[in-house]
Image (spheres, rainbow, N blue to C red):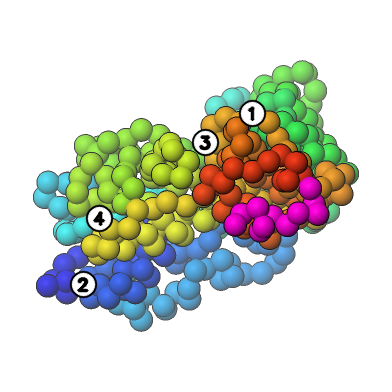
Amino acid sequence: MARDRTFVIAGAGHAGGRAAEALRSQDFDGRIVLIGEENYPPYERPPLSKELLRGDDGVERTFLNPAEFYAGKGIEHRPGTRVEGIEAEAHRLRLGDGEALDYDKLLLTTGGRVRRLTLPGADLDGVHYLRGIDDSLAIRKALAADASIVIIGGGFIGLEVASSARARGCKVSVIELQDVLLGRVADAEIGRLLADVHGAHGVEVLTGIGVERLEGEGRVRRVVCSNGRALDADAVIVGIGIIPNAELAEEAGLEVDNGIVVDVFGQTSDADIHAAGDVANHPNPILGHRVRLESWQNAQNQGVNVARNMCGVRVPYAEVPWFWSDQFDINLQMAGAPESWDRLVWRGDPASNRFIVFYMAGDVVVAVNAFNLGREVRIAKFLIERKTPVADADLADEGIKLRDLAR
């Protein structure tokens, strides 16, 4: 009987929290244990670099549910608890407090951790990374009016923090090693447009430049760049990527390759262990290749999907990847995850900050980026999912409604 079974979720972030909810909504009436290292209930990460930094609100606004929700659903939430090891053959977890916890099925939603600087001065006070609530609160405290803030890394986290810091009246510089912003995830022209947006709002954007060292007596005061320039810094925020927390899985003998390798149902190389969220390397039937996604959409939807599959539903996880970022007066939305494209097709005037750009492979849309046109992205996702052939001229013609092309 299901009520005699124990499902354990290791990782109480967004994916783990939604998975726990989904197990109960599937009428699983067994024991659910949700284990997390942080001392908070499951929460959303996007506000950490946006609303939580810009305002003075409490952390509760980030929670998926009130803390008491889990007990009300019969979900054992164990905050501040670390999983030390997985004994897969015995179906047992070793916890940091010495407890051995047996499971029938295990879901790994262990997420990722920030990649850290390994250069001189990286251990000085005032050097921050953003991954959790406590990080966000510490950074918010550092964003005093007129403070000089240096951000290392011109990806989404760095650019969102730059926007939030300017909103709080800080002087902001962004240093990006690549020649353009967002060079790993978008066409170079998108990176140049975002650099212009940030420049127009008073952010100094330095691209194609590395960092040699951080200087200061006990606390960071300067960032020395590879071109010899030194930037004053009251605080430094580092956003140079995420490392998937796959060590538990690897030590347990599961297949690991840029995350925990799973199938379309979220199942690992062990039939009773699943994975979801930032840590899961999964096949995407729509894209035709494997991906590991660090996004709100994937954490939520894959967590729910895999929980349902653990209950025997067996529904493949197949969605067009989608991501959004708010920076100043720009809402940037991206859909798809192309490995290559032939050309770009523009719809709208980039100078207006209201446009959508289509990444084309042959006569098929493989990805889109949009500035302040979120509704269009929802329609464009259908073009990507269905691989609908469409002419460049029709995509570019604002007189033709996108929904007509998606039919």
Quick check: marks 1 and 3 in contact, CB under 8 Å? Answer: no
Q: Is 321 situated left or right of 370 in this image?
A: left
Residue wearing tag 1: 342
Q: Of the residues under marks 2 and 4, which one precedes in the sequence?
A: 2
Q: Position of residue 258 (x, y in %)?
A: 40, 34
Is residue 245 shown left or right of residue 203? left
The part of the image, by quadrant, that contains residue 144 is bottom right
Q: Which of marks 3 and 2 precedes in the sequence?
A: 2
Q: Is residue 34 visible?
A: no
Q: Position of residue 276 (x, y in %)?
A: 38, 51
Of label 3 and label 4, which has the lower sequence position? 4
Question: 46 or 393, which lies in front?
Answer: 393
Farthest residue, direction bottom: 72
Q: Amino acid at mark 3?
A: Arg
Q: Nearer the viewer, mark 1 or mark 4?
A: 1
**Label 2 vs label 1: CA separation?**
51 Å
Q: Give above or below for 89 relative to 406.
A: above
Q: Position of residue 178 (x, y in %)?
A: 68, 26
> Which amino acid, by three-letter code, is at mark 4?
Leu
* Label at residue 115: 3
Instruction: Give the residues drawn in magenta, as a range.
Output: 397-407
Q: Which residue is mark 2?
A: 30
Magenta span: helix, strand or loop, mainly? loop
Residue 169 in the image: x percent, y percent?
A: 83, 53
Q: Quadrant of the C terminus?
A: bottom right
Q: Give the structural element (helix, strand or loop) at label 3.
A: loop
